[in-house]
Amino acid sequence: GKVPASSILASAPSDKNLDAWRESGCRTTHCNLEVLQESTLVFLATKPHILPGVLQEIRPAVGPHHIVVSLAAGVTLQTLQRFLPAGTKVLRLMPNLPCVVQAGAMVFARGSGAGDGEAALLKNLLSSCGLCEEVPESYINIHTGLSGSGVAYVYLFAEALAEGAVKMGMPSGLASRIAAQTLLGAAKMMLETGEHPAKLRGDVCTPGGTTIHALHQLEKGALRATVMNAVEVATNRACSVAKD
Amino acid sequence: MSVGFIGAGQLAFALARGFTAAGVLAAHKITASSPDTDLPTVSGLRKMGVNFTVSNKDTVKSSDVLFLAVKPPIIPFILEEVGPDIEARHIVVSCAAGVTISSIEKKLSTFCPTPKVIRCMTNTPVIVREGATVYATGTHADVEDGKLLEQLMASVGFCTEVEEDLIDAVTGLSGSGPAYAFTALDALADGGVKMGLPRRLAVRLGAQALLGAAKMLLESEQHPGQLKDNVCSPGGATIHALHFLESGGFRSLLINAVEASCIRTRELQHLADQEKISPAAIKKTLLDKVKLESPSLSVASASKVSLFTNRSTSSKKN
């Protein structure tokens, strides 16, 4: 409820996706320049390879009052600033999928033209979608490996948990819901208590009990190293994709 | 108070050294005995000023607190031998891994109606007064007897009372623990040498690093995971190294080790209780000695020896 739908204008070359916007009460157009003329805060949400063309198109209409936020993966602030007028307030944002349910994890970095005011505005606005933190641009690829792709790791883990339960005799629908709630609850405890996950893990382990036996299995499978590998690989991939 | 050690090996030596260094006991108040005078630790004990004798009976007579510091399979022979000399005033402290209080009480009760028995599990760093000791008191040992032992052992490190059924786990963790640490230190030193350090320096630095880390943990309220994080700067050397440890299953190896040691302790106890142990497992000289002192205990040359009769497997009373 931070921004009324009527204050949101979205543009796209075709109507393919615009219906959904109109249904939520937003205005739509096929003209990118119109978005620049009608809006102060402009999000660039195209695929990365399309962006340079779009930037060249809108450049004449970009003024000192505009705040331009790019969501394009791999397109650096340097690139964005090169295509736009000098001094334009540019920021780069990397969200993740659960923004859709307002439980996203987002990071953003400022370009040279963007100041404290713009950063605060963006952070304030985006907090409605989840956790939003300002970072140096170099962290953005790490965020991709950790949280952008990370969502998929969690889905994989949840599926495996449920599968284990099914093997032990529980129906899959129920197992899936409980697996999801378990992850949600554990994550909530981490965020709300601020305690180190190692300590929270220890709190669950009664001596000689079920949990410590299970954890031993996870350690035997070198789960920690495997997860570290995943984050590393995804981050490196984000870096190399950006270079192309 | 005088203290006696049946057995004059590594454990007796470490404890005697620790007690005297801590000043809780003068060397001349300590007696140690063993039939084997060739042990390297025997001369060490003598040099300390400890009274050394080949007679276990003499040790018992001159002690208030009697440590049984022999290997587990020897315990029943010792108990047979010195049983008649055990009085109600004695506090018998067994340090033998896997040997239960009830098995000792059972054996001694044929000689003394209410023997005070305490079972303890310590470790070798008592020698430098950084031991880790736990104890459980037997049926006839009072709170004061436990406290007396605790005071003695606290002078050489950490000491706390536990339920007897935890002692095997303690064996796996802190009993065997120093061996895990020595292995790690040897390997760490190898790493240092590989990267160019002279061996002596590598060993010294590796040991100091572990000592310092352990001290930090003991003095901190923080979880070791948090302390680890504090060392790992983002993208730095340490986190890269840790990734290697995780890839190798470092954590699970350590869990496996503690588990294996604990399980083996229980196995040995089980073997001792339920089955018979071959005399080949016990040094010939000791057997001969025992035969001489206790003609009632006969050992057939080819057959096996029954260690305990009618023993129960129950542990300490709850």
Image (spheres, coloured by chain):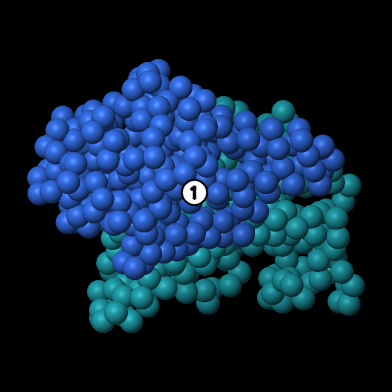
Chain colours: A blue, B cyan
Does residue A206 appear to the left or right of B182 in the view shown?
right
- Quick one: A236 or B107, which is closer to the camera? A236
Residue sitting at x 41%, y 32%: A28
- Residue A199 visible, this angle: no
- Quick one: A161 or B12, which is closer to the camera? A161
- Quick one: B104 or A123, which is closer to the camera? A123
B28, above or below A38, in the image:
below
**Quadrant (top left, top right, bottom left, bottom right) of the C terminus of chain A:** bottom left
**Quadrant (top left, top right, bottom left, bottom right) of the N terminus of chain A:** top left
Residue A156, image x, y percentages: 62, 50
- Residue A158 visible, this angle: yes
Does residue B187 appear to the left or right of A109 in the view shown?
right
Residue B196, image x, y percentages: 26, 81
Residue at which label 1 appears: A150
Residue sitting at x 79%, y 55%: B270
Residue sitting at x 68%, y 71%: B286
Residue B94, image x, y percentages: 62, 49
- Quick one: A61 or B14, which is closer to the camera? A61
The kind of residue on which mark 1 rests is Gly
